[in-house]
Image: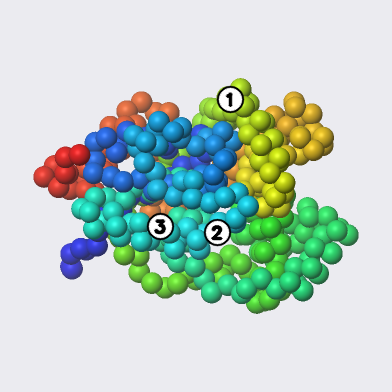
């Protein structure tokens, strides 16, 4: 059997509020790692509190690549992430270190490792027709239509995520094939790294839900609404931008528009974050190559370290920091 000589990489995945960042920082103290963020919200500057972005002191001590690289007015896609992450990983490997990619955006992980399908470009006429139909029957009904045409895509797209919902229906109209089937096709190119996938998967959803509620309350206490007010005051941002559609920000925007009370905003933000975590957990369970760890089980750090030592090799391969 030929020896796999590809450089090594580690994916540390998990739902929101599962403790990925703290664990990644802890591991980087022990192993020759460099951290790369895999998060569709952390890329945006000025969105710190509502994204649970690591604070400035943490980022100085434990630098995370691909954090604060976009203005919120500029969309950032899975294709952008792949284009940014691959050269970063090559640079890290060339330095004799191991890239540790940490985050919860499953689409980014999949695009990185499997490539991107040759999807059709956006078609303004098709999008306008879909938007007109949605204005008549509502986006929940459009989501129900997608559930019939592409149940796999519908399961991972929230009924309120207008952009992704519209895109999935647009792809079906333009190609006659489900978006999920096209995305499975990938680029066909082998991934240049041998990957260890570590997934934090809470066994007790109730504990995770409580942690999410505590996180939302901590964000509010830290000034999350003031952060959103500053974004609104710019005048060039709106709720249809990917940055503002991020969980928490969309609900805060609606509250500041007068469409929800403070209590309603809190409840909606918690519910939306729980739904995000549910989708992330579903995606993680579908990745049979991932090693699953319960984040609240005693001895998590020791078990993760054992898995990494086995993957990285004996101690003589672990360079001192």
What residue is shown with label 3? 85
Q: Residue at x 53, y 31 (%)?
A: 208
Q: Residue at x 49, y 50 (%)?
A: 69
- Whichever of labels 1 and 3 marks the residue nearer the N terminus, that label is 3
Q: Is residue 73 left or right of residue 59?
A: right
What residue is shown with label 1? 222
Other residues around mark 2 within 10 Å, as few (<14) / some (14–19) / many (≥20): few
Q: Quadrant of the C terminus?
A: top left
Distance of mark 1 from mark 2, alpha carbons? 29 Å
- Whichever of labels 1 and 2 marks the residue nearer the N terminus, that label is 2
Q: At numbered mark 1, what does the secondary structure look like: helix, strand or loop?
A: loop
Other residues around mark 1 within 10 Å, as few (<14) / some (14–19) / many (≥20): few
Percent x, y of residue 214 = 57, 24
Q: At numbered mark 3, what does the secondary structure look like: helix, strand or loop?
A: helix
Q: Nearer the viewer, residue 221 or 27?
A: 221
Residue that protrudes farthest toward the front in the picture: 234
**Is residue 96 placed above or below 186 in the rendered structure?**
above
Distance of mark 3 from mark 2, alpha carbons? 12 Å
């Amino acid at each position: 059997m030929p020896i796999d000589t590809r450089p090594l990489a580690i994916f540390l995945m998990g739902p929101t509020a599962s403790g990925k960042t703290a664990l990644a920082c802890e591991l980087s103290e022990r192993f020759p790692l460099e951290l790369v963020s895999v998060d569709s919200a952390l890329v945006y500057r000025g969105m710190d509190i509502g994204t649970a972005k690591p604070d400035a002191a943490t980022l100085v001590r434990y630098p995370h690549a691909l954090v604060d690289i976009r203005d919120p007015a500029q969309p950032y896609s899975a294709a952008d992430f792949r284009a940014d992450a691959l050269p970063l990983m090559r640079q890290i490997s060339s330095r004799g270190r191991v890239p540790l990619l940490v985050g919860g955006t499953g689409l980014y992980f999949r695009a990185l490792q499997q490539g991107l399908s040759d999807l059709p470009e956006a078609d303004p006429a098709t999008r306008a027709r879909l938007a007109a139909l949605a204005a008549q029957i509502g986006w929940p009904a459009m989501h129900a239509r997608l559930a019939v045409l592409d149940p796999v895509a519908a399961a991972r797209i929230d009924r309120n995520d207008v952009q992704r919902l519209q895109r999935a229906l647009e792809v079906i109209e333009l190609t006659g094939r489900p978006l999920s089937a096209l995305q499975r096709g990938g680029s066909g190119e082998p991934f240049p790294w041998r990957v260890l996938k570590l997934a934090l998967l809470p066994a007790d959803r109730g504990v995770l839900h409580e942690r999410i509620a505590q996180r939302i309350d901590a964000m509010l206490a830290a000034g999350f609404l003031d952060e959103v007010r500053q974004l609104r005051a710019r005048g060039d941002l709106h709720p249809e931008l990917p940055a503002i559609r991020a969980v928490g920000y969309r609900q805060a925007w609606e509250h500041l528009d007068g469409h929800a009370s403070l209590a309603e905003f809190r409840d909606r933000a918690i519910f939306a974050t729980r739904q995000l975590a549910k989708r992330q957990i579903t995606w993680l369970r579908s990745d049979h190559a991932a090693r699953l760890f319960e984040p609240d089980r005693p001895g998590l750090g020791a078990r993760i370290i054992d898995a990494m030592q086995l993957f990285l090799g004996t101690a003589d391969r672990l360079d001192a920091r």
